[in-house]
Image (cartoon, coloured by chain):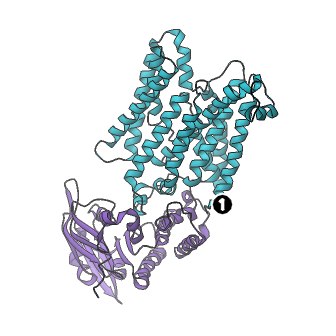
Amino acid sequence: MPTRHRALAILALLTGASLGSMLLALAVGSMHIPVGDVFNALFGGEGSLSGDVVAHLRLPRALAGFACGGLLALSGALLQVLLRNPLADPYILGISGGAGVGAILAILLGLGVAGINGASFVGALAAMVVVFGLAHGDGSWTQTRLLLTGVIVAAGCGALVALILSIAPDHKLHGMLFWLMGDLSQATNPKLVLGVLAAVLFVAMPFARELNLLARGPDMAQALGVQVGSLRRGVYIVASLATAVAVTQTGSIGFIGLIVPHLVRLAVGNDQRLLLPASALAGGSLLVVADTLARSLIAPQQLPVGVLTALIGVPVFLFLLARDSRLRR
Amino acid sequence: MTTPPPLLQTRRLAVSIGQRIFCCDLDLSLHAGERLAILGRNGAGKSTLLSVLAGLRAPQHGEVLLKGAGYAELGPRKSALIRGWLPQSRGDAFASTVLETALVGRHPHLDRWGWESAKDAQIVRRALAAVDLAEFEQRDIQTLSGGERQRLAIATLLAQQPELFLLDEPVAYLDLKHQIAMLELFAGAARDCGAAVAMVLHEPALAWRYCDRVLLVHGDGATECGPVREMLTADKLSALYDYPMLALERDGQLCLIPQ
């Protein structure tokens, strides 16, 4: 039986975990900073080297990472409901493919960070409009049609990316690959992404119970009083924009959007009123922890964080899946 | 005092998909306490007609009124407080418990930020008990049998507490005992709570026993509607199903034998 009390308790627990992950990200790195100094740096002490590292390098990166992880997980959760498919992720409808083409093209042309971000956002929006337009074509809008259109557009974008990679000069390949695998080192604008994360939650939460119904089938939802058509369009637009913003900031970090909503669902159930905020918190924490590992495991060298999210996510996911099937027997 | 408008009314209703016309100029009204059976061959358009009546699909022409108001006028939530719809097939994409699934029926009764209260849980538990699923509360729906899943869908509909029940093959997947039990439930709702029931059935004997009126859907656009005794005759049913039938009446029950 879902209750508000249980949901708040779980969310409080996850908020604690999120704060813990932030603290870890601020303390750990190529230069270790004790937790006491982290607090000093955050709430007063200016001027020291460790204070500068925490306040100007690690904090913006950790906050941006948290927001992007949250956005990806939230978008994954929304698309899994929209497509009624637990295997859907934020990239399944071609958003990251479009963003990838834009970003790689910008790197090929030698544009700066702002140019790459802008081009990838335009690419993501273009993919979103193409998929929406094609899937919406004759007015009927089945999830199969949407899914197929998205998968095909994603495949087309993948081919374009491969084409550009194969003709790109060698010295640009490293940057392109890092972008494609996901990388937080360019994510320095936490205010924007945190704002978008808050806005997406703010827009989605009033419709959480209606999303529960949508997950059980569009006809069923309509019969129980949901405006299915407008809800579906809204979910598509919000989830796509969330993905586009996250991908623009960090490149296409895999697995967060697929695995986090799935993990949360296995742990706390499929009530979107709890699942959506819990996914945002868990996705944010996971990306912050993965990024901390990515920049400290072989410091001062950095690993692409997308590799780390996959390496953490896959075993956890397989464990929960095995546990779940044992419980059900 | 004027009489209240019928719970369900259609005016010159035409339903079709592509070139296939299922009914045209159908005028139908269903008042509180009335039970209507919809019979016809496979693919004759019974389910399509029912989903038009439920406001899930737009008719070709004509209008469907709930208590005198159209679906567009009422909006989805107010409609859901009046009419409930039992779908023919269900696909469960995600795991969920039996209790959580039946609680979904309470959706139209809750406001936007509302959570299910103890009272809602009580209504749902009563509905689960009524369909013989009281012990199943915590079971995952993906482990239920076809008949149990059908009874859970009926419990969800009962938890919705609509005044008009639109049932698409309510006895599908059910064993004989539960077929009678479920139809008794809806007959009771019509008799005691003033509900109206329209149901698609494949068994004319059950329509005879549990309905007042029958709508025959011939599949070529022709429909006939009338009292059970006039509609469920060997001649009419032989024509409807395109197969010769023999009707026997005994102790007030009807028995139909395919020849």
Determine whether B8 is above or below A9 in the image: below
Is any part of residue B171 visible from this angle?
Answer: no
Determine whether B1 is above or below B218 in the image: below
| Residue located at (30% from left, 61% from top) | B48
Q: Position of residue B158 (x, y in %)?
A: 47, 72
Image quarter (top left, top right, bottom left or bottom right) of the N terminus of chain B: bottom left
Chain of the residue on which disc 1 is drawn: A
Residue to which mark 1 is pinned: A5
Determine whether A12 is above or below B197 in the image: above
Residue B212: quarter of image: bottom left
Q: Position of residue A273 (x, y in %)?
A: 56, 54
Depth order, front residue of A52/B98: A52
Q: How many labels sit on residues?
A: 1
Depth order, front residue of B174/B30: B30
Depth order, front residue of A158/A64: A64
Q: Position of residue B180 (x, y in %)?
A: 44, 78
Is any part of residue A192 visible from this angle?
Answer: yes
Q: Can you tell which chain is drawn purple?
A: B
Residue B57: quarter of image: bottom left
Q: Amino acid at mark 1?
A: His
Q: Is residue B15 left or right of residue B100?
A: left
**Mark 1 burial class by Cα count in 10 Å: few <14, some 14-19, many 20+:** few
| Residue located at (20% from left, 77% from top) | B235
| Residue located at (45% from left, 78% from top) | B185
Q: Position of residue A150 (x, y in %)?
A: 41, 36
Image quarter (top left, top right, bottom left or bottom right) of the C terminus of chain B: bottom left
Q: Can you tell which chain is drawn cyan?
A: A
Q: Describe the element under mark 1 as helix, strand or loop.
A: helix
Q: What is the residue that sits farthest to the bottom in this orientation?
A: B251
